[in-house]
Amino acid sequence: MTILKPISENSSHAIVKKIFEDIKISRKIETIPNFWRTIANDPDTLERTWNSLKQVMKEGSLSSLFKEMIYIAVSMTNSCEYCIRSHTKSAQSKGMSDEMLKELIAVVAMANETNRLVESYQVQVDDNLK
């Protein structure tokens, strides 16, 4: 259950209105997702987060699809269902297939397993890896 109620899409706050419109245009959507409506309780946080996300997730040396897949992997590791679903949908719209998603899940599961083993055994880092 959310701590604060999501802000209406018809908010009268100037920053919120501006960001909501930018989200709709950038994402090619008609409805503002709950995440953005909820963090809009603090317009400064909404603005900072939206601007940072746009900057980080834009096409660059890494494709926007690859960035979405990294986002999914981190979200899986952090157990954020909302982010997993949101970024999976976004990655699919950018061309991620079901086969790619299955491989991504396998890599995330394997990395988490071996990370836990390394930490549990307190494995010393090899000199050639430093």
Image: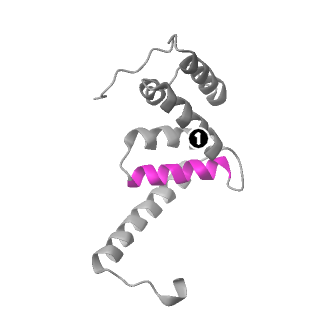
**Magenta includes 65?**
yes
Task: Check disc 1 and report the residue beneath it.
Answer: 52
Q: Quadrant of residue 122?
A: bottom left
Viewer-proximal residue among 128 and 52:
52
Q: How is the image coloured?
A: one colour
Q: Quadrant of residue 123?
A: bottom left
Q: Residue at x 40, y 21 (%)?
A: 6
Q: Give the answer, above or below, for where 11 lies relative to 58.
A: above
Q: Which residues are magenta?
A: 63-77
Position of the N terminus, as image quadrant, is: top left
Query: Which residue sits furthest bottom?
Result: 127
Viewer-proximal residue among 46 and 87:
46
Viewer-proximal residue among 20 and 74:
20
Viewer-proximal residue among 70 and 41:
41
In what element is the residue under mark 1? helix
* Prevailing secondary structure of the magenta residues: helix
Residue 78: horizontal and vertical position, in percent?
Answer: 38, 51
